[in-house]
Image (tube, rainbow, N blue to C red):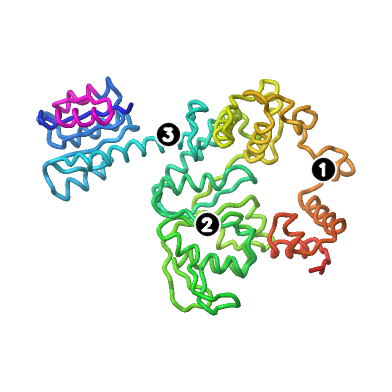
Amino acid sequence: MAKILVIDDDRSIRETLEMYLSEEGYDVITAPTGTDGLARFVEASPDVVILDIRLPDVDGFRILEELKQEDENHKTIMITAFHDMESTIKAMKEGAFDYIHKPVDVNELDISIKKALNAIEMEKKLKGFVESARDYKVGDIIGFGPGMREIFKTIGVVSQSRTPVLIEGESGTGKELIAKVIHNNTDANEPFIAINCSAIVETLLESELFGHEKGSFTGAVSRKPGKFELARNGTVFLDEISEMSWNLQAKLLRVLQEREFERVGGKETIGVNARIIAATNKDLRGMIKERLFRDDLYYRLNIVSIRIPPLRERIEDLDQLVSYLLAKISRELHKRIVKVSDDMMDIFRRYSWPGNVRELENLLVRASVVAKGQVLLKSDFPVLGDGDNIAVPAGLQPDSAWHESGRFLTLDEIEERHIRKIINETKKNKGEICDMLGISRPTLERKLEKYGINYEKE
């Protein structure tokens, strides 16, 4: 039950609000003066304070300042009988959550209180704390280590503006989740539009981003708005930005610089109001050196950078992540899975998690499907259950193709051998090979050129 403190020298207002808010299910405390209100605030630690600006003993703005110093996690809604613009601006500037005029409209107040409580809840989410599995909420981020705490701080800061953000991290670390949290704390009522730059060929990706005019290319039977138009004042999330072609990178740079673009085949200039958040699992700095990524675009995207640590660097979060994911999985599968056995958790802690949180969730889903009880046992995890592959992830044993002549191969060497192996053993065409590798056609062409692989089968 949320606690609300009402500080107002008008007895009738205090009694009216106490009666109404109590009926709405809130725990209500009242105070007739600023001094008394501060004392009640310290005693009760309310979630929301309804504060009159004009009090008999202390100015309401002074009380607002002292309330913030005492506890910055609460929200203050200020009320006044005066309708001057200066007071409204001052109240909001000095940290009030909302400003309502007398006579108080209870419906307006009710909406403001609910918004305040929702804001408090969102701020708690940014701290990454989940008290127990039954408190599962969609979109929570779990993190207690220093790396994740810095991410939460950055999210809080960047959510106050609309500056571009670049999110870097390995596959499966939760880059899109971070982007959604930033969006929800900035423009929750506006669209969040995600697009995977590696999943769409260059010609179609340009149309997806910028839209096209009727007749601009074969199949363009009508005008189509692009993602930047559809996003309005929301967010466009560009996942795997490293896979975007050089030509499209130049067009995206113009969007960031000029805040405008034209549809494919069009002449009308369209303004861009959407925020751009990009994500990558590649080393963009290294790609710049190889002239695979534009340095000017990188600097435009990298105004604020967030690096998500891989799961192997945040094993301290593993217990909470497992509890969180089991709650989610139990809801989705309509089962009651309460925990992972202690011996299996020991294996989890020693495993290096090459697939990060996504791999953890997939393992838990498969185990939950076959589990016969409420506790997931080693026998439910045939891939990891014997513990034989925990020191080095499966497929990376010393006698594998990842190791040669007493040394581990470089990533480029591994990638080249993997591509050659698929080409030689499958004899597939380029489109099918792209599907097998999980990359776009332009990316495959670049890699074939990079490794000197001559393969023309269509």
Magenta-colored stretch includes residue 181: no
Instruction: Residue at 77% x, 64% y: name it.
Output: 430
Q: Amino acid at mark 1?
A: Phe
Identify the mark nearer the N-term, 1 or 3: 3
Q: Amino acid at mark 3?
A: Lys
On the image, numbered disc 1 is attached to which residue? Answer: 408
Instruction: Residue at 19% x, 25% y: name it.
Output: 30
Q: What kind of secondary structure does the magenta stretch mostly adopt?
A: helix
Residue 124, numbered circle: 3
Instruction: Residue at 22% x, 43% y: name it.
Output: 99
Q: Residues within 10 Å of mark 2 (few under 14, many from 20)?
A: many
Q: Is residue 39 left or right of residue 442?
A: left
The number of discs equals 3
Identify the mark nearer the N-term, 1 or 2: 2
Q: Is residue 284 left or right of residue 416?
A: left
Badge 1 marks a residue whose secondary structure is: strand
Residue 301, numbered circle: 2
Disc 2 or disc 3, which is closer to the eye?
3
Q: What residue span does the magenta drawing correspond to?
A: 14-40
